[in-house]
Image: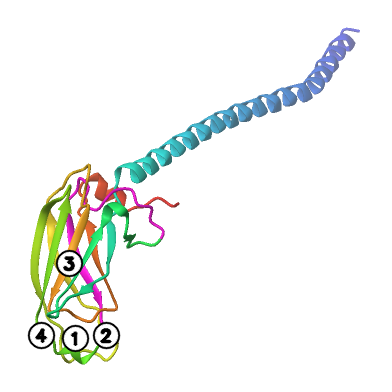
Amino acid sequence: RGIRPALGGRVVSVLRLVVGIPRAIVRAVVGVVESLLAVLARCALCSSAVGLILALTFVGYWGAYFFLVPVPTHEVPLYFTYEHGGNACARAELGARSWDSALPGEVQRTAPGAGFGFDALLRLSLPASEHNLHLGSVMIDLDLFTNNLTIAHSSRPMLIDSGAQAGPLAPSLMLLEDFPTVSATYGVEALSVCMRPAYHVFTAGVVFVTRLRGWRAMVSSRPVMM
């Protein structure tokens, strides 16, 4: 009789253990799921924070690029008036925006040289005519004006190789190198270029290349996608 109660107790204990196993498994699974959800919630929060930081960084970079970095290159087209004696001169009023950017699609934000040093380069497109090839040395005069004052003058010779190719000629001449900063308010308002004696010209223009330094040079070399 004493054996039967002990055996019955063991059976009951085993049954309780078997019934308790599924509950333990369910509790473990629920705990794992809750942990995963907590991790996912933290990841989502971190992703949102990273996305917000990236968005603010992009907006700040775009703002600095657009509002604080000047267009690095401007091209001013020239239209020469030929005078008696074989000379020719052209004048361009930059304040009237009688010029275009040298970079297609660029939005003009500052006048050439406004608050920054710059280079000035003359670009010509010439027919390979007998006149141009045998003209010899031509003196190129450049004058820059700001607020009705002459702020720069340059006079340099240009010589075309008489054995040049038969197609259009494309000579260029550096007229100013690293000209100091001019007024941040006005920049270069007007310019004139004279040729003595004059080439026969297809097209001509003066290219201003802004000398950017420091963080502006870094940002300008990595433009924002627009």
Pair 3/4: label in front: 3
Q: Quadrant of residue 183?
A: top left
Q: Secondary structure at mark 1?
A: helix
Q: Are marks 2 and 1 in contact (CB under 8 Å)?
A: yes
Q: Position of residue 153 (x, y in %)?
A: 9, 60
Q: Which mark is residue 136?
A: 4
Q: Quadrant of the N terminus?
A: top right
Tell me the kind of residue under disc 3: Val
For residue 45, above or below residue 197: above
Q: Position of residue 67 (x, y in %)?
A: 34, 42
* Side (left or right) of 31 relative to 184: right
Separation of disc 1 and disc 3 at Cα?
18 Å
Q: Secondary structure at mark 2?
A: loop
Label 3 vs 4, first from the N-terminus? 4
Label 3 vs 2, first from the N-terminus? 2
Tell me the kind of residue under disc 4: Gly
Q: Which mark is residue 193?
A: 3
Q: Position of residue 139 (x, y in %)?
A: 9, 74
* Side (left or right) of 42 relative to 217: right
Q: Which residues are magenta?
A: 105-127
Name the residue: 39% across, 43% down: 62
Q: Which residue is mark 1?
A: 132
